[in-house]
Image: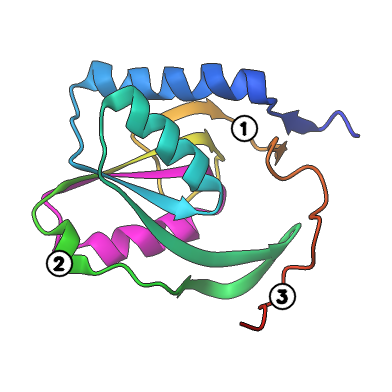
Amino acid sequence: MSDDREHLTWETYGTAVRELAGQVADDGYRPDIILAIARGGLFVAGSLGYALSVKNLYVMNVEFYTGVGETLDVPTTLPPYLDKFDLTDSRVLIADDVADSGKTLRHVYDFCEDVVGDVRSACLYEKSKSLIKCEYVWKRTDQWIEFPWSTLPALVDGGVQDA
């Protein structure tokens, strides 16, 4: 593997997410809900939930990246869809693994707009080109990031399975 990549190991992930949670706690922000951006944000949201004693975890499945450096024209929300009513007047912490272009985060912020009481974001990594500047970031980098959950190839094809 090339040295121009950021490598996050499972061991380092534990430290990173705990430090990220520490930023939220030290800031005095007490979210009612942690909103994970699937898929990478699922790990972050669950870990933050435990560290911050937040049991209300919600998920938005947003597709944007279709491959390394390949994206759709715009981020697209996939089912099952989150009901905005569930977020009404809540303090929401959006969780994701990386704020790369920021387009996915912008999509989720737009979804929350005019509904939630307060919305903030926490990401393990933020890139300088991100449209959204997260309130809580563990590390800033412009390198490609190798996450421990996505470095190995899938064991099965990712197509829609017949029921």
Quadrant in the rendering for residue 2: top right
For label 1, the residue is 141
Question: Which x, y percent locates residue 29?
Answer: 19, 29
Please give the name of the residue rendered at 41% of the width and 40% of the height, measured from the top-left corner. Answer: 45
Q: Specify few, some or many for label 1: CA neighbours under 10 Å numbering under 14, 14-19, or 20 or more.
A: some
Question: Marks 1 and 3: in contact by CB < 8 Å?
Answer: no
The picture places residue 130, in percent across and down from the top left corner, at 50, 48
First reached walking from the N terminus: tag 3 or tag 2: 2
Q: Is residue 9 visible?
A: yes
Residues rendered magenta in the picture? 93-119
The numbered disc on residue 22 is none
**Residue 44 in the image: above or below residue 66:** above
Residue assigned mark 3: 159
* Image-quadrant location for residue 64: bottom right
- Describe residue 94's horizontal placement relative to residue 104 as left or right: left
Give the number of callouts.
Answer: 3
